[in-house]
Amino acid sequence: MLRRCGFVAAFMLASFTTFEASAVERRVAFVIGNSDYQEISALKNPAKDVVDVSDTFRQAGFDVFVASNLTKLQFEDQFRNYLAAVDGADIAVVYYSGHGFQIGGENFLIPVDASLKQAADVEVQAIKLNDVLQQMRSKSKIQVIILDACRNNPFPRKDYWLRDQLLTASGTGLAQVRSSLNTLIAFATEPGAVAYDGAGDLSPFSSAFSRRALAPNQEIRTVMSAVRRDVVEATKGLQVPWENSSLIDEVVLMRRSSRPSLPPVLEKVVLSGAGPVDLDLPEPVEVDGGTITVSIDRPPTLGRLMLDGKAVEAGELIQGKDLPRLQMDVPKGIGEPEEMDMLAYAARDNWGGEAKGMLVFRVKSGEGTQGEQVMASLEAEQEQQVLQRGIHVTGAAEAIESREIDVPVGVGAVALSLDLPTDDAAVSLRVANYPATGTLSLPDRALSPESSLTVGEVEVLRYEPQIGASAPVEVAFEIRADSGASKPAKMTLSPSVDPCDSAAGEPLDLQGVVPGLLPNEIGAEAVKLCEAAVKAYPDVARFRYELGRALLAAGKVDQARKAIQQAADRGHVRAVFELGYLYATGTGVAVDRKKANAFYAAAADKGDPYGMTSWGRALFNGYGVERDTGKGLDLLLKAASMGHTYAMNDLGAIFTEGRNGVTGDQARAVAFLEAGVQRQDMYSMNLLGRNYLSGRGVEKDPKAALALFQKAIDLGQPYAPGSLARMYRDGVGVEQNLDEAQRLFELATSRGDQSGAYDRAALEMQKGDKADQAVAVRFLAFTVALDLRNELPDARATLAQFGAKPKAAALKQLRGELKSKIPLSGSVDKQLVKVARAVWEQANPRRDLF
């Protein structure tokens, strides 16, 4: 029976240890295959490419996001989840197989629902490669983009808007891309050339990549050179893969740096004169899969080392699986008195990893009665060891079998806290079924579908769910001891979203894990839920930001600002934007446009779509900063490409009116507004409805306008009631109904629409002798109070024309609506405006809703 040999273990382990634990690299890949195009011809290979390539990255230990046949909206959703996972990653990879082409030197990837019939469509339907790269760059240390998309432009239209120019699309291939520092961009073929689908199930490029990327410990540039040779050979020189690289760090996809796992120094009693005795050495565990060979560095000197009846000499190689079958044959006459001997050996894997082992022998005489007694005792111990190992294997399987564990999403790798009832070094676990999403890891390495782990490593086994995944995943192991019988065991891991995320997560938060809620959707329970999350995960900045949102919704502005600042200090980018918003709106601080812009710019630099929109808007219009129309327009277009509807609405207005030197284009404006409506944005609905009323960029359609206005009203949009009210007031597309117009103008006023308030006052005065001048004064006061940008200067002058009596009546009524008195001074007009503002804020304490 083997025992751990404590008296020499420390010395020998110090001599034999060759590897140190290192931090686990965070490696995330997004693999996309678009085959089933709706408006153009389908591609046969990408849907199959994606399966093969995603398996390759999974075997390399990546967290792999896999997607097939993505529409534009689906790409936005899944890319946001990917970006949240990439945040702080060592390596970020995007692999795309599908249609792609270039316009004006810019490369675009094509979703399956793209039609690209209009000149404005490429900006709202296609995916700009450079935008993808910039987002990856803002979040990860190293970026790798691999494109099997260099095909002919399949669309009949060739001219498209990009920024402020109408450009012609190239007929073939993709354009060369300038890569930033520590970036590699690989193309299936050289710039301007076309890639081929090939005759097999996979494209020549994807097939070669999947095969070559699995080579262990090969740097990616070496891998891509091998891929190039294979593709050139397969296509007879018609296709030459290409890459741009600015890598300064080594990138190894299939990293294999672990050493085989061996138990500590072992001790065994061997009898002389008893013939070959089983040494019962445990089989080395190859943690990364593959095979192990064992070399005998120092054979024993007191006897012969045997395998299958043949002597094993110094330097001889045997298979790792044969190590448990080694025997020792000590001739008679040795071991009286007891003598010491040793066996030293080394286990080596496919990847160059090495571990050394030692077995210390206590050689005793096997002759006479005493020898027989020792032999009987050893045989009994051996039988007991076999029995115990069977019990250990069974116990380990039972500790894992049918376990169901909830694992929180977005808090990093979570320890599974598996407690096995054995520490027997001979027991190991092989991964039999790797989770379909997410990653398994140990503190010193990521696991792959081919990994094994020792029984001692199980207690630190971790799982990190994939962001956006909700379905439970199954993990299965084969548990074994040496070369004996094994037992299967499986467990279920269920990704779970923290209640704070569900209660206060924000839309388009690139460090968030949920679709998110608008401010008016945050409930009263959110504060307690997020306080609990911050306490449980103090290092997760996202929870501090969501606590800030919850506190803001509860009206606790000072506490909210503190939590948001803490989140920003810990690296949460949306919190940086939110600080800018607080300064821009004067929420809890004095209005400071310069400070607001500084925060907006910082958030934009980190890729936040809200930051891009606000900073782009400031630059385009010169709000608190010198106007830079070109840069502002670029930022708005980037934010829109990420699905931010506020940017789409700004662009709709810019192209509708032709602002600041940008050429007006009604059809281009409509394209952005339609994109916003597609994403259920209530502001887009109101703006597009106005286009249908006026016929700008579309044919006049009052019914379509009415439907859009009504849907926007139902969603809480502040200006849509006024838009619909004007239809009823003027009898456009509906039967004239002044009562309904009046109701809708009053609803618009209650939501903060100064134009709705102004029109309500005008509607009152149109009643002639039946007009209630106090009502007109009331709504003029609301107009001025809500018109913070002085967009309706005539309202103040109109208010001044009314007499003292209606003003006094209106002031009395407004003051009566206040729950608490406010100090008043100055002219009656000033008092009216101040009280009107106070009444509106009393009814709308959540100014962040508008």
Image: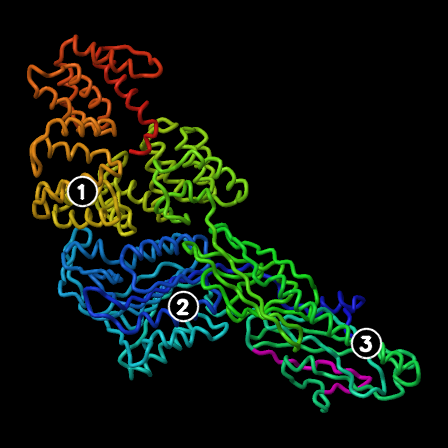
- The residues colored magenta run 291-306
For marks 2 and 3, give the CA distance: 51 Å
Residue 163, compared with residue 712, is above or below; it is below
Magenta stretch holds residue 302? yes
CB of mark 3 within 8 Å of CB of mark 1? Answer: no
Q: Residue furthest bottom?
A: 310
Q: Which residue is mark 2?
A: 54
Residue 702, compared with residue 318, is above or below; it is above
Q: Which residue is mark 1?
A: 708
- The residue closer to the viewer here, 621 or 846, is 846
Q: Please state which amino acid type lies under the numbered disc 1.
A: Leu
Camera sees residue 657: no
Q: Please state which amino acid type lies under the numbered disc 2.
A: Ser
Residue drawn at x 27%, y 62% is 109
Residue drawn at x 22%, y 53% is 124
Horizontally, residue 237 falls left or right of residue 699, namely right
Q: Which residue is mark 3?
A: 380
Give the percent coordinates (x, y) of residue 482: 67, 75
Q: Please state which amino acid type lies under the numbered disc 3.
A: Ala
Quadrant location of the C terminus in the rendered image: top left
Horizontally, residue 800 falls left or right of residue 85, namely left
> For the stretch drawn in magenta, what is the main secondary structure?
strand
